[in-house]
Amino acid sequence: MRIAVFPGSFDPVTLGHMDVITRAAAMFDRVYICTMVNAGKSPMFTTEQRFEMLRAAVAELDGVTAELWTGLLADYARERGARWLVKGVRSGTDFDAEYGMAQINRSLDAQLDTVLIPSRPELLHISSSMVREMIRYKRPLEPCMPRAAIEVMKGWG
Ligand code: PNS
C-alpha cells in the first residue's frame, strides 16, 4: 500500500491545495492531508479551524483523509506508515524552501522521501496569503477557495 502525507498550514485551504491533493490521490493508495503548525507563521485561523475547513474540502475525495497533528511531521508520517511526503511548488522560492525541508525530514527518517508537484499555471497566483486578503476585504472567495471550506467559515459568522 502506497501511503503519502500532504502536510501544510492550510490557513486556509485553497484551490491550489485542492489541485495538488487531487493529483496526489491519483498517485497513491491513501493520502493523509495533515493540518500542522508552522513555527514561522502567525496564522489567521486556529489549528482547529484550519482543520475543519480542510476536512470539509476533502470529504468527498476517495482515499483522502484529513487530520490534525501538532508534533513533528516525520513522527506523524511514521505513525501513519507513510513513506512519502507530498508538497506543491509554485516557484523557485517554494522549491528552495521545500528542498531544505525535504532534507530535514529525511534526516529524521531515512525512509521518508518527498515528492514535489508543480502547480498548474492557472492556479499559480492563488496562495493562502492571497485568500486571507480576499477574506479581510470581503471579496468573493469562490475563485480561490473550495466551496465546502467557504461554507464552514460562513458558519462561524
Ligand atoms: O503550508 P506550510 O506553512 O508551508 O507548511 C509547513 C509545514 C507545516 C509542513 C512545516 O512547518 C512542518 O512540517 N511543520 C511541522 C513541524 C516539523 O516537522 N518541522 C520539521 C520539518 S521542516
Image (spheres, rainbow, N blue to C red):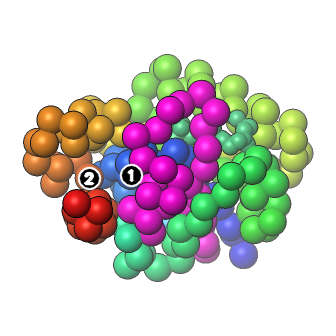
Q: Residue furthest front?
A: 157
Quarter holding the C terminus? bottom left
Where's residue 143, x and y in %?
Answer: 16, 49
Amino acid bearing label 2: Met
Dots 2 and 1: beta carbons under 8 Å?
yes
- Residue at 75% of width from left, 50% of height from top? 71
For label 1, the residue is 13
Q: Residues within 10 Å of mark 1 (few under 14, many from 20)?
A: many
Mark 1: secondary structure: loop
Quarter holding the N terminus? bottom right
Residue 97 lies within the magenta run: no
Left or right placement of residue 38 versus residue 19 in this view: right
Q: Is residue 102 above or below residue 27?
A: above
For label 2, the residue is 145
For the residues marked 2 and 1, what is the alpha-carbon distance in whole angstroms?
A: 7 Å
Observer-nearest residue: 117 or 52? Answer: 52
- Residue at 60% of width from left, 37% of height from top? 38
Observer-nearest residue: 78 or 131? Answer: 131
Left or right placement of residue 130 versus residue 92 in this view: left
Where's residue 45, x and y in %?
Answer: 42, 47
Q: Residues within 10 Å of mark 2 (few under 14, many from 20)?
A: many
Where's residue 113, x and y in %?
Answer: 74, 47
Residue 47 lies within the magenta run: yes
- Residue at 75% of width from left, 68% of height from top? 80
Upstream in the sequence, badge 2 or badge 1? 1
Is label 1 within 8 A of ligand 1 (CB to nearest ligand atom)?
no
- Residue at 29% of width from left, 62% of height from top? 156
Q: Is residue 63 above or below residue 85?
A: below
Magenta span: 29-55
Left or right placement of residue 91 versus residue 110 in this view: left
